[in-house]
Structure formats: structure tokens, C-alpha cells
Image (cartoon, helix red, strand yellow):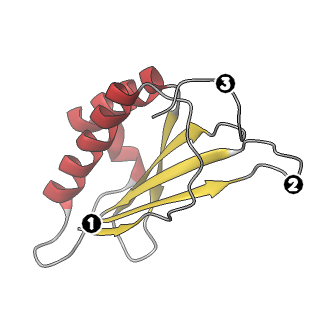
Amino acid sequence: MRLQLPADLPPVSADGAQLRLAVAALLEHALRRRPPGTKVLVRAEAVGGSVDGGAGRVEIRVADRGASRPGEAKYWTAVEGAEGAARAAGGRLRVEETPAGGLTFVLVLPALAAGGPGRRA
């Protein structure tokens, strides 16, 4: 597995237990789908927000290099579990094709504004 997690990610508004379940399901799925000898990439980044302190969102991407297409993902039990956990955590899940082949699952979570109230995960 290869991790790209910047130290300056903002906190997110999420249910921590559900967030862990969503990420674990996506990792398990990606590890099963990846071709032998390849790594799963996990990357997080802050997206959006504004100069005046708008919160934006945090996207956690889990990418494999398997031979799957986005339309197939809705039939996998692990993905259904991750999608439900993402919603329960306060976010959403989308699926994209990985440019080099395979799928990238993007867990989108609302970021907290600096000093803002909310659940932290």
C-alpha cells in the first residue's frame, strides 16, 4: 500500500466509527482487486474552501489497478458496505476510472471550518 496523506488536512465532520468502516471496506476491496505485484494508493486532499475560512471538503481516494469498470462497482458487497458507511459518516462515495486501469473510490467528507463546531474524525 502507498499512502499520500498531507499533514495539513483539515478536520472533517464525520462519525469516526463509520468513517473507519468505510475506509476499511474500500481498502479490503482494493487489495483483493489489484493485480499481483501492484500497490493500492491511498491519497487524501483538501478540496474547495475559500480564503475567508470556508470549509470545503476532504477527499480520500483509494485506487487499485484491477480490470474493473465503474458500472460494475455497484454490485460488490464491500462497495455497498463502504457506501452505506460513508453516508452514515456524513459523506458520500463516488467511483472513477483510474487512468492507468482499475478503479478509484473517492470518499468525500465535509471539512470543518477553522474553529468551527461539529464532529471531528
Residue sitting at x 23%, y 72%: 39
- Residue 114 placed where, x, y %? 71, 41
Q: Amino acid at mark 3?
A: Pro
* Residue at the image point whose x is 56% and y is 59% from the top: 45
> With respect to residue 85, does 75 lie above or below?
below
Q: Circle 2 is placed at which residue position?
A: 51
Task: Tell me the kind of residue under disc 2.
Answer: Val
- Amino acid carrying mark 1 in the image: Val
C-alpha distance separating marks 2 and 1: 33 Å
Counting other residues with Cα less than 10 Å from the Cα at mark 3, is it few (<14), some (14-19), or many (20 or more)?
few
Dividing the image into 4 quarters, which one contains the C terminus? top left
Relative depth, front residue between 51 and 22: 51
**Which residue carries the number 3 mark?**
117
Choose between 115 and 12: the one closer to the eye: 115
Q: Is residue 10 above or below residue 13?
A: below
Which comes sooner in the sequence, label 3 or label 1?
1
Image height of 62 relative to 71, above or below: below
* CA gap, disc 3 and disc 1: 34 Å
Q: Which residue is mark 1?
A: 40
Q: Are marks 2 and 3 in contact (CB under 8 Å)?
A: no
Q: Residue furthest top?
A: 88
- Front in this rendered view, residue 8 or 50: 8
Disc 2 versus disc 3: nearer the observer? 3
In the displayed orientation, state which residue is furthest to the right.
52
Tell me where residue 57 appears, x and y as whole percent.
64, 44
Label 2 residue SS: loop
